[in-house]
Image: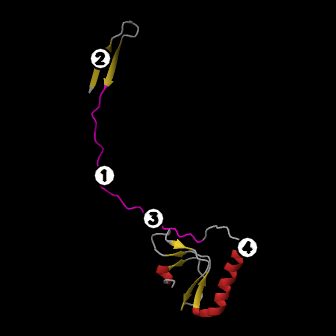
Amino acid sequence: MVMTFHVASPNPVTHRKATLVVTPYVEPPKRAHTHQEPTTTVVFPIEELVPETTRHLELRTALPLTLRNAFGDRATVGSDQFVYYHPQRPSDCCAPDVFVRLGQKQAHFDTWKVWERGRLT
């Protein structure tokens, strides 16, 4: 639709004709609902920087070595590694100075996930 109107002004120089073009609003076409749940990746950190004293470091190093020698292949010994308790909540964890899993041969691992490796008793 086109509308023409005059803009009145006391000054004859600014008295002019204006044109206004009005177009009706057209609703955009609706798209099919394609909402998808975002995929989230659960991150399980393997380290955290925590300061420790020299004495603590010595004990934390000696105890796992002593336990590995004592148990041999009859247990897995971990030291200062995260133990995760739930596959969807990385915040449910602890990092004990040492832990032992009896009945499982010693293996190398970054973290202990109880749903993969079993509970620590």
Q: Give the extent of the magenta segment.
A: 21-46
Residue at which label 2 appears: 5
Is residue 24 covered in magenta?
A: yes
- Identify whether 4 is placed above or below 87: above
Task: Please give the label number shown on residue 115.
Answer: none
Q: Position of residue 87 (x, y in %)?
A: 46, 73
Q: Which residue type carries mark 2?
A: Phe
Mark 3 near mark 4, Cβ–Cβ under 8 Å? no
- Three-letter amino acid code at the position of disc 4: Thr
The residue sitting at 28% across, 39% down in the picture is 26
Q: Which residue is mark 1?
A: 31
- Marked residue nearer the N-terminal end (3 or 4): 3
Mark pair 3, 2: CA separation: 59 Å
What is the C-alpha distance between the residues marked 2 and 4? 88 Å
Picture coordinates of residue 68, whole percent (x, y): 64, 88
Percent position of residue 83, x then y: 54, 76
Say if residue 107 shows up in the picture.
no
Q: Is residue 87 visible?
A: yes
As helix, strand or loop, the secondary structure at mark 1 comes to: loop
Residue 113, percent from left and from top: 51, 78
Which of the two labelled residues, at mark 2 and mark 4, occupies the earlier sequence position? 2
